Image (tube, helix red, strand yellow):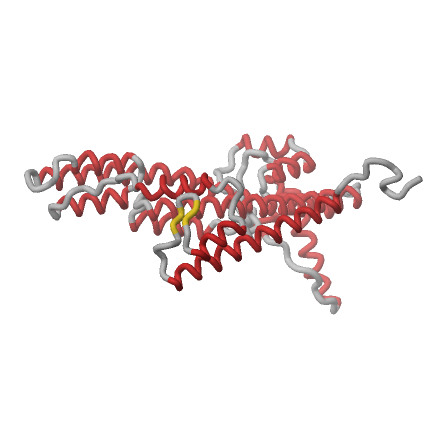
Amino acid sequence: MLAASARACLTSLTRSTQLLDGKSLTGTEPDPVVVLNRDLLRSPSLRMDGRLAPLDDITVDHIAAAAATSWMDAFENRLAHEDYVAARTVVDVIADDEADADPVKVEEMSNRLEQGITRSRQKLRAFRQDISSRVNKAARLGQLGTTKYAQVIAALEAAQVERHDLGTVRHQLIGIAEDLPRFAEEAKAALWSRVQQELNAAAGRVADNAAETIKACIDAGDLATAEEYLLNALAGGEPPTAEVSEHRAAFLAVARSFGTGVDSDIVQVAERGGSVHGLEFGHLSDAARTAAEEGLRQWVGMKTVRERRGARMKSVFAVPSSPTASGLS
């Protein structure tokens, strides 16, 4: 570390004295933080931010590990942990400071670095989208209060995949993923405590099964619905029921009856106002029957187009059965 600082100081002093000879300064002054800390990049366990400032307290063990680790091993370690800012600095150190630096090796390291950044960004973009969907779902279900929601959104906004410290971005996204279940459990406990207090205070004026119904929603994680049930119960209303509709079974029965799908025969039945497979067209008005006929006719037309297209594709990709069939002799 001291040697690196001395070299940087010597370079800076040399350039400064050249001003007396009328020469202008070239290049840029190195960042003092980078000069002082870049040798610490060789310590595998020392975390550093985008400016190479240590995130952990530097210990003797960190310094000893840095002294015992080569720059190539440091590069592999930083690359594996998506610490691309540090990895890029390691490449620069190897290219500039080592007398026997291999240009081919340096270029290979640079290529691996860029490929790693591209892969990480692709994976993190998908991971961030997944986390965003989880956050939105948790908010819809009422699992995030105003404060927690603002906290999560702020953390999600900070975890941008366009940043260079992608390892830090990944840790931020993992942190959000770990916080969501905890926030949900806290919200469940808070709502159930409130439900008990308010239902007890309204004893005799709420339905007997109100607490059971609300508790089922809370256990399922649907706190928004539980909140609505609570307000409904406190207003004297009955908890809603989830009776199974007969329409779904009837619809599925009709769908199963069309073994061969929609065909021209069904279109003709619709046109005549008849009935087929449980579908009754006779009670429809003229306008509604015409609309049904036209819709079914369009359906048959699309089915025909798909079948023809499928037949053409099969002929294109068909494998000749013999050399003669393929035009070979």
Q: Quadrant of residue 286?
A: bottom left
Q: Is residue 19 above or below residue 130?
A: below
Near-viewer residue (256 or 320): 256
Near-viewer residue (205 or 278): 278
Rendered residue at 63%/54% (across/down): 30
Q: Residue furthest left?
A: 204
- Whole-percent x, y for residue 224 in the image: 27, 46
Rendered residue at 70%/59% (across/down): 15
Judge from the rendering whether residue 21 lies leftward or rightward of residue 85; answer left or right: right
Near-viewer residue (30 or 22): 30
Would residue 53 be seen by someone viewing this image from the given angle? no
- Whole-percent x, y for residue 326 in the image: 85, 42
Judge from the rendering whether residue 214 lies leftward or rightward of residue 310; answer left or right: left
Q: Residue furthest bottom?
A: 22
- Whole-percent x, y for residue 12 in the image: 67, 56
Q: Quadrant of residue 38?
A: top right
On-image quarter of the N terminus? top right
